[in-house]
Amino acid sequence: MRARRHHITVHRRLFFSGRLWKRRLVFWGGAIAIGVVGVGFALASDRSRDLFRFAVSFGWWVPLVLTPLGFLLSAHLARTLFPGSQGSGIQQAIAAMDVAAEERRSGLLSIRIAIGKIVLTLLGLACGASIGREGPTVQVGASIMLAAGRLGGIGRPRTLILAGSAAGIAAAFNTPIAGVVFAIEEMARSFESRASGFVLTAVIVSGLVAIALVGNYDYFGTPRGQVAGTEGWMLVVVCGLLGGLLGAVFSAAMLGGVGIIRGFVSAAPLRRSLLIAFACGLLTALIGIATGGITFGTGYDVAKAALDGTSVAWYFAPAKLVATLLAAFSGIPGGIFAPSLAVGTGFGALIAAVFGTAIAPAALLGMTGYFAGVVQAPITAFVIILEMTADTHDTVPVMCTALLGYGVARLISRESLYHGLAKAYLRG
């Protein structure tokens, strides 16, 4: 009885502790900030895409000037003013969890880098780069939460990074469950019981803020049509196997290409990196012009149309894949989540055309198989896609497709994309 009273007394002291409440309030404030920034980033990204469309309305030749110069400017600012902001940002967050020195961690995650990440991603979208804002939101969220932890005296950087990353995914896609799963499966590669409360709290708070600001929306909306019958399960197998294969090819090409470019640039870092950025921008413009503009930007509109049952040009998926690789090779800030989802829907639509099946279910399964192959995180893949589409009818087919895509990708490459990219920051 005495031990029980002592236990209750300790808990009361902890509950009313001013120091602990300061930590709680600062942590919640960080989660609120991630929600607000995530929503603002999403709205600004839409305006940036609109700005590019407006610029292109002046003539087909505009991307030939705007896109390579935009890539050049973005790469230059990322190298000189905002070092550490290049690429998706997820790899920096992963690397930062394994870095012990505070100075090195600050070179991967900081408020300065977060600001640069947002500004330069918007610049990339405004010049037609095949990038998304979702990966960058992970780095931004991790940076905000790490800064909040320093302010509140919370000495658990790994936990803070996990919580900020999960909150970033939740705010970016309005997918709270996927945010938690992403932190466990992709970021930490394990379940950390000590971090679970932090992750859940950050996701809930940032998610509530996002819902309060823009409502409880579905990123893609519910696809038209369902996966059913023999035809549907045939699509599960084909989209899972071939989607995973294509995703693994993309992942291997990105890891190999980035490694080659890093070696080439090392002799003259600034000059050679800007040369590559300009060349990638020019090739992106040429591909965009040749495909009628459908490969510029995130690819959201094409993906949404495919999920609604609208046919997609057969060349969209391969052209979009190449354009996304070019953005990654250029060194400009920007993520691959949204472009990868678009590539997957284009691939699924192509499968539907070959087999004469309905477009929407094939697009959904193609997106799942390809995305699972790219990120090699099957649970994250099917959870995030089911949440983005609010699809409660195709749960098992989507899960099976994600598992097949992941299995094929693992046979081809034992190293996942983001963890492979993170190694460069751990060596640096």
Image (cartoon, rainbow, N blue to C red):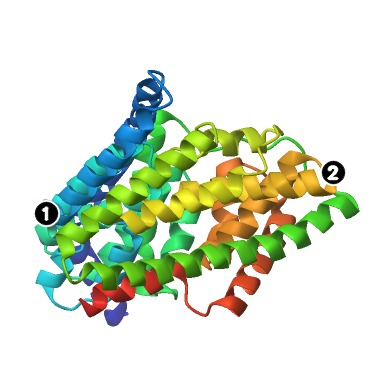
Disc 1 designates what residue? 80
Q: For mark 1, does the 10 Å Cα neighbourhood hold few (<14), some (14 to 19), or many (20 or more) residues?
A: few
Mark 2 — residue? 356
**Quarter of the image where one finds residue 248:** bottom right
| Left or right relative to 158: residue 361 | right
* Quarter where residue 220 is shown: top right
Q: Residue 56 placed where, x, y %? A: 39, 24
In this orientation, does residue 245 appear?
yes
Q: Position of residue 151 (x, y in %)?
A: 10, 57
> With respect to residue 70, does 327 lie above or below?
below
Residue at coordinates 71% horizontally, 65% vertically from top-left? Answer: 241
Where residue 336 sits in the image (x, y, percent)?
43, 53
Taking depth in this image into account, of 313 and 197 the one nearest to the observer is 313
Question: Image point 41% across, 25% down: which residue?
Answer: 53
Who comes first in sequence, dot 1 or dot 2?
Answer: 1
Residue at 21% x, 60% y: name it. 272
Image quarter in which the N terminus is found: bottom left
Q: Disc 1 residue type? A: Thr
Local SS, label 2: loop
Could you say which quadrant of the image residue 303 lies in?
top right
Q: How many marks?
A: 2
Residue type highlighted by circle 2: Gly
